Each structure stands twice: as structure tokens, then as C-alpha cells.
Image: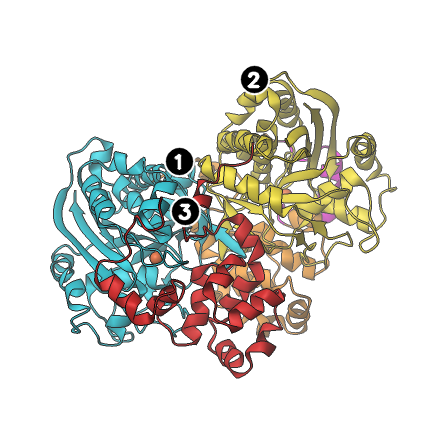
Chain colours: A red, B orange, C cyan, D yellow
Amino acid sequence: MALDKPYKDVPGTTIFDADQSRKGYWLNQFCMSLMKAENRERFKKDERAYLDEWAMSEEQKQAVLARDLNRCIALGGNIYFLAKIGATDGKSFQQMAGSMTGMSEEEYRNMMINGGRDPKWGRS
Amino acid sequence: MALDKPYKDVPGTTIFDADQSRKGYWLNQFCMSLMKAENRERFKKDERAYLDEWAMSEEQKQAVLARDLNRCIALGGNIYFLAKIGATDGKSFQQMAGSMTGMSEEEYRNMMINGGRDPKWGRS
Amino acid sequence: MARITASVYTSHVPAIGAALDLGKTHEPYWQPVFKGYEYSKQWMKENKPDVIFLVYNDHATAFSLDIIPTFAIGTAAEYQPADEGWGPRPVPKVIGHPELASHIAQSVIQQDFDLTIVNKMDVDHGLTVPLSLMCGEQDPVKGAWPCPVIPFAVNVVQYPVPSGRRCFNLGQAIRKAVESYDEDLKVHIWGTGGMSHQLQGPRAGLINKDFDNRFLDLLETNPAAAADIPHIDYVREAGSEGIELVMWLIARGAMADVAGGPLPKVKHRFFHVPASNTAVGHLILEN
Amino acid sequence: MARITASVYTSHVPAIGAALDLGKTHEPYWQPVFKGYEYSKQWMKENKPDVIFLVYNDHATAFSLDIIPTFAIGTAAEYQPADEGWGPRPVPKVIGHPELASHIAQSVIQQDFDLTIVNKMDVDHGLTVPLSLMCGEQDPVKGAWPCPVIPFAVNVVQYPVPSGRRCFNLGQAIRKAVESYDEDLKVHIWGTGGMSHQLQGPRAGLINKDFDNRFLDLLETNPAAAADIPHIDYVREAGSEGIELVMWLIARGAMADVAGGPLPKVKHRFFHVPASNTAVGHLILEN
Ligand SMILES: [Fe+3]
Ligand SMILES: [Fe+3]
């Protein structure tokens, strides 16, 4: 039998395991490159040209250009890597996390102030 | 009590442990740099100038210049790192190992052909 | 001989670092968070350790996908605060303790923990935010952290992360290692990260106060039960990033009661929601 | 399901690589060495595996003192032969097996082995010399190794290295991991390095035929006893670099008899002194 992967059935959640990591290798390595100030500058100047330097799929590039973090995660991205894109954009972790929930920035912030998302969310 | 280090009493032998590794950090990192062809060229052109780029002690630099591998090891070098110096010089592992024994290259080679050094060597 | 005198547990939310660095500590949003660490800063002054063994995780900073150590111990002389994309935090560099770190590495590897030894790495918010919270703000150049720090990085980014039980056992091995060091040193062990939070997907923002407070209860008096919590329970109950709590079990495993001594004294406990996306939890235990 | 069909043990002396690459195999000095692998090359053709899990050590090549993993598993798609200072060996690149490697990593970490996962590394003579010996010479561009290889690097450079017992237990965990992989794959596990040799100090050139042959005997029929040999005995009896033999115990621990099956069949055994500074030992065991 294959390995047990019980984390596959958690709603609204993608666990970054070896399969995801393999899929997202170049996407995540691109993100790592944004830890250098000069690379952030080059990326900001011409995002498409910078992305084309990496062995990413066209889908991954489009997801980055659209700042669609859910899509990035589906394509193998990990949030700690993707956070480097947000940092380059001057976004906070709260803005990034909120952007994946379908809520507005204010709605998400208010949800957090009011105690955060109910842990029973999405469970049957 | 401190950790037991029984390997300290083996004759003619220096075990590369954390203490040695700390002492030899820059010496060994210098050696690593010789894995790049362009660094080997630069080192060969002006050994002293190249060594001066590294945070090594004067003693370590002298030991390298003299190709005194026993001295290099006493100063924290590890043979797998030091082997990069020998490689740069076009020496084989046998020539390097032999150079530490006080034997001539031919004597050492003959000892090996005749079955190697007796494991009882240096024991009381 | 060296000994572990206390353990400290705290979240290491990056936004806390940003609030400190941007002078936002007196904003109403942040005041309750920093108030929870007032006692701790005083306690640190009165109980200054000689060395802090700081368990944290690297957040895709020093370790990319090129190399992912399950457990990495820093044996370097110093570590620079990392540029995580916003520029490096304006905090002092971290001074290491190569001798004790190497000693612990040697001892723990011989106790069958397969550590990776690291001599070159930048340290991210996972390590510097707890220092800021516990030691207060420090000038990046003229200031200094109160003592040397041994960074101990745990992989909680790419699954599978080590189990809670493995972490708890590792803590016990670290205690033995510390106690076999000849010099008389007071060592703190800190477990950082958590508490409940999820930073990704439609479920981002999950907080579970009940889980967190039960975890704090168990940590005080029944850490072996906390060590039995399987990975999937953290994900389901505490959010995908709540798994960071396994790092607290390394610190807890190093306390004297686990080796048959008396229960630790609870010096301080604090819990607050939210800091950014995260439930902030904090505990100080003394041997 | 995947299964381990055989294990191979062999020295990985760099001079053997040089002899191959410089066309010296027919010199009288080298003939007896390569003669010892004639059977093995034929056996490899008749028993072609789908994947080789190749246990070796990095000799300050991919891993400098910046980072020293105790156990590192390669999950990359491919690996280039390293330039160890003499230029890269003229051999084909090594194709990995990312899926099986990741599967094994996940399973073995959950069995409490604290692996480091590596996705980018060059491989040195420790890995390529055994491939050359067992598969014969290959054109670096037009040639190819017979199947994908999973590199598994063990720290035997900076003390403390993992104990023989730890390595033997790890082999058992690897066997379980392989057997939980759904695809039908024949997997070889190779243990490389050794046998007795010392490359440093006035004692360089040490060889201990008695120790080596006793070790081969134990490996055949009583590997648990071999696993009990403490580190210091390798240093004293087999020379400071003889410690590489602990890697053979990883391969041996993965064989069926260790989990209660029958003893493996000894297909081939070879021993010769010297190759350069080293005693060459070689064993092929089939489940
Ligand atoms: Fe964190
Ligand atoms: Fe070797």
C-alpha cells in the first residue's frame, strides 16, 4: 500500500508535501530569488521578462502575474516562498493570507480581530 | 563529565571532530574554492595573494605553501578538503597520503603493494 | 556542569517584528500583545541565561528547496538577520556559542538523532521575533542580545515534519547533552512558533482557542500527552501552520520532570488573539 | 509493490575512477582489481534493477563545512558528476527517481530518521566509481547508466558519524519504505566505501585484511554483530577512513533476513589489496 495521506481531505487546505514540492520547484525557487534587493528591482521593472528566466510553466507564470495565490498553491507553491512576492509588492502576511479567502481586506482583518475563522469551518 | 573522546589516543591519527572543524574552518573552505577551475588558475598564478583572500591564520597559509599536509591537519584541515590542493597540483591521493608518512613516494607505493601498513603500527 | 534552568514558549509572528520595527507597539491593535511580554522582559533581566538554545523554524529563508534538513543545529560564531523580502530586520546580529553547540551536536547525534550541522546561515523572524519579545528592542549596531544563542531549525515547511513524539524525545537528548558539558552554564531552551494559524487557501485565518489552551494546559502538567498528538490533528484543529507547535515539545522535553524530576514552576502564561493571522501563546517554565 | 531484490557492497576508491578514465585498466597494477568485477558486470546485466538506492558519502564535494547533513537523500531529477579538483569524471550524468526517493524520504522520516532532503547536488567519486565498476565504462554523452539512481549521502567526514547500529536500523526503515511503494519495481541497495584505509597522518596506508575479511564474513551471515562494532574499533582496526564501512550496514539492514526472512544468497565475494591506499572489498547478496 502507498503511504497514508490523511491531510488530503482537510477543507480549503493544501499540505506542501513532496508531490507539491516537486510540482512547484521552479515557482518556489523563483520566489527565493526575490530575497535579494537587486532581483526585486529587476522583477518589478519587467515581471514577465524576469519570470521567463525561470523554468516555470506558463500557468505558474500567469498565476504569479495575477497574484493569484490560491492558483500558485495549486501549482506547487508554498506560502512561505510565495510570501516573497508579497514582500516585493509591500504587502503584509495578513493581506496575502486574506487574499486567498474571497474576503475583502477589511472583512478578513475584522474576522481576525473577532477571534479568527471558526475551526469547524468547512467541516460536515 | 565531558564527552568521551577515545579517538584521541590513536597513534599517527587526527580525527576530524567539531574542535578540529572549528579550528580549520577557513583553511577547509579555501580548499573547497579550488573545486572551480578558475580558482585553481588564480591560486596557481599567485598562491600567496590567493591565500590572503581567506581568513586563515598565517600558520595555516605557511602550511599550505609548504604543502605540509601533517601541519595542515594539525591546524584543523581535513584530508578530503586538503585533497583539493593536491588535485590542483596534479597529485594523486596516494602521493598525498604518502607525503604524510615520512616515506618516499616509491617506498610508500611499495608498502601498499606489499599489503599496506601493519594495523599494529604504533601500538604499544 | 551546564544545566537547563528554564524553558520559554512563544509564537514568532512576523507582523510582531514589523510592529516593533515600525514603532507600532503603542497602537491599540498591538498593545495587548506587547503587554503580555512585559513580565517576560523583566523575568529575562532577573534570570539572564548564559546561553539560549533557540528552537525555531526557517521560513524558506536560509533553506530553499535545494536542501531541507529535518533538524539543523547552528555551530557558527555568528548569524546575520535575514532579508526575507522586506529587507533585514533592524536588530543586532546573533552571536553563537560554537563550543556548546558542537558539544550538543556531538552528543545528540550519538543518541541517534540525525542532525545537520550548519556553519553558515542567516536567521529569519522565527528566531529574531522571540528575541525581540523577550529581550526588548535593541539598536541594530550599538545594541546586543543579552547572551549567545544556539539556533536550532526544524523543518515544518515541507511535509513530513518530525512527529511531536520525535521532538519530545529530542528534547530529552538535548538535556542530557547540556548536562554533560563541563562549564557551569545556565541554559534556556526556547520553543517557538504557533499557536493555531493557517496562512493559506480559503481556510486561511483559522484560529482555535480551545485547542491552543488545551495545549498550554498539557504543556504545563502532561507534556507526554501533548507529544502524542498526531500531525493530522494539528492540521485539522490548529490550521496548516499550527504544526509549528511541535517545536514547543523539543523545549518541553528538555525539562527536568521528563527525566523524573519535579514539575516545572509556571512563571507566566499569556494568550491573545490575534496578531495578524495568528493566535499568540506564551509560557515560561522554570526547573 | 516495489521490493529490494539485492544488495551490493563495494569500495569506491577515487584512483579506480582515474584508472578507468585514463585507460589504465590493463596495467598489471589494476588488472586484479577490475578482474574482481567481471562477474559483477555480467550479473548486473542479468539482474538489471529498475532503481539503485546508492548509499555513499560525499567527500567535501557537495557539502562543505557550511552544512553537514548526517543523512541526505537526493530527490532531484538528475545529478551532474562533480569537479573534485581534477575536473569532472567523464561519465554520464546520473538520472534520479524523484517519486520513489520522495516516497522513501517521507516514510523514513515518519519512522524517526531525521533525513535532509536534497534537490540540488553534484555527485562525487563515492557515487560514480561504484556505478563504473558495476556497469562498466559509459560514454559521458552517448552512454547512460542502466537505470535511475537515488543518491543517499552519509556524513563520515566530520565526527561524530552515525553509529553502525543506527545505520543498520536505517536500512530496515528503508526496506519498509520501499515495500510500501505501489509500483512494481526491482530495487538494488548499494553500500559503498571502505574497506580498511587511512589517508592521513604518519599512519597513512594502514590496511587490515583480517578485520576486513571478518567484516565480510559477518556481513554474509551475522550483520547484527557487525552493527555492534563501535566507531572507535573502525578507527583503531580499519584506519580513520575505514569508518566508511558503516554505510555497508545501511544496505545490509535492508535485506529480508533482518526482518525474519531467509539469509541472502552470496552471489559474489572479492577482496584485493591495494587500490591506491585502500583495501578493495566487494560482495553481492541476493534476497
Ligand atoms: Fe513560523
Ligand atoms: Fe570514500
As helix, strand or loop, the secondary structure at mark 2 comes to: loop
Q: Which residues are magenta?
A: B100-118
Q: Estimate the x, y position of residue D74 in percent, counting from the top left.
A: 59, 48
As helix, strand or loop, the secondary structure at mark 3 comes to: loop
Q: Gap between marks 3 and 2, in whole Å?
A: 38 Å
Q: Nearer the viewer, residue B27 or A69?
A: A69
Which kind of residue does numbered mark 3 sit on?
Val
Q: Determine whether label 3 and label 2 are within 8 Å by CB.
A: no
Residue linked to disc 1: C111
Which kind of residue does numbered mark 2 sit on?
Gly
From this viewpoint, which residue is outermost toward the right? D26
- Chain ID, mark 2: D
Q: Is residue A74 above or below residue D96?
A: below
Which kind of residue does numbered mark 1 sit on?
Gln
Q: Estimate the x, y position of residue D186 in percent, counting from the top left.
A: 69, 32
Q: Estimate the x, y position of residue B22 in percent, counting from the top left.
A: 44, 55
- Chain ID, mark 3: A
Q: Determine whether label 1 and label 2 are within 8 Å by CB.
A: no
Q: Quadrant of residue C150?
A: bottom left
Picture disc at residue D260: 2
Residue B109 covered by magenta stretch: yes
Circle 1: is it few (<14), some (14-19), or many (20+) Cα within 10 Å? some
Circle 3: is it few (<14), some (14-19), or many (20+) Cα within 10 Å? some
Q: Estimate the x, y position of residue D184 in percent, counting from the top left.
A: 67, 33
Q: Is residue C87 above or below residue D123?
A: below
State the quadrant of the N terminus of chain C. top left
Quarter of the render that holds ligand 1: bottom left
Picture disc at residue A10: 3
Q: Is residue D89 above or below residue D274?
A: below
Q: Gap between marks 1 and 2, in whole Å?
A: 26 Å
